[in-house]
Image: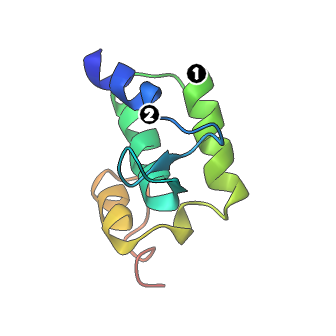
Amino acid sequence: RAMSLYIRNHQQVDGGWGTHIESPSTMFGSTLNYVALRLLGAPADDEACVRGRDFIREHGGALYTSSWAKLWLCVLGVMDWRGPNP
C-alpha cells in the first residue's frame, strides 16, 4: 500500500511519471510506474492508471520507451521478446 501511495504522489499533472521524482514525465518512468501500479493491484480503471495509460498512448505507446523498460515488459510477459529488437 505504501508503494502504491508513493507512486501516486509522484504522478505528474500530465499523467506521466518522471525517471526520478524531480524529472518531467518520461516514457521510461511512465511505463514502469504504470506497470508497478498494476502489479500492486490497481485496476485498469483506477484514475492514476487511466491518466498514466493516456500519457503513454499520447506519446506513441510503450514501443517508445527505453530498452531497459522493454526488457522488464518482456520478462513480465506483456511484450513479445521481438519488441526490443524489431
Say which residue appears at 54% left-offset and 69% top-offset.
63
- Rendered view: 86 above or below 20: below
Disc 1, SS: loop
Q: Quadrant of residue 36?
A: top left
Residue at the (48%, 45%) spot, across then down: 17
Colour treatment of the image? rainbow
Depicted 53 relative to depicted 44: above or below: below
Confirm whether residue 44 shows in the render: no
Q: Which mark is residue 56?
A: none
Q: Quadrant of residue 40?
A: top left
Q: Position of residue 64 (x, y in %)?
A: 55, 70
Which of the labelled discs sits on residue 10, or is there none? 2
Residue 55 lies, in percent from the top left, at: 65, 48
Query: Is residue 15 found left or right of 74 in the rendered image?
Result: right
Residue flagged by tag 2: what amino acid is it?
His
Among all residues in the image, which is located at the extreme top? 1
| Residue 6 in view, yes or no | yes
Mark 2 burial class by Cα count in 10 Å: few <14, some 14-19, many 20+ = some
Q: Position of residue 72 (x, y in %)?
A: 30, 58
> Which part of the image, by quadrant, shows the N terminus?
top left
Q: Which sits in the foreground, 13 or 50?
A: 13
- Provide the secondary structure element on which disc 2 rests: loop
Disc 2 vs disc 1: Cβ atoms closer than 8 Å? no
Q: Residues within 10 Å of mark 1 (few under 14, many from 20)?
A: few
Q: On screen, 46 above or below 63?
A: above
CA separation in Å, label 2 and label 1: 16 Å
Q: Pointer 1: what residue?
A: 46
**Who's the residue at 45% across and 26% down the image?**
8
Q: Choose the circle earlier in sequence order: 2 or 1.
A: 2
Residue type at mark 1: give it. Asp
Residue 80: % across, % down: 42, 66
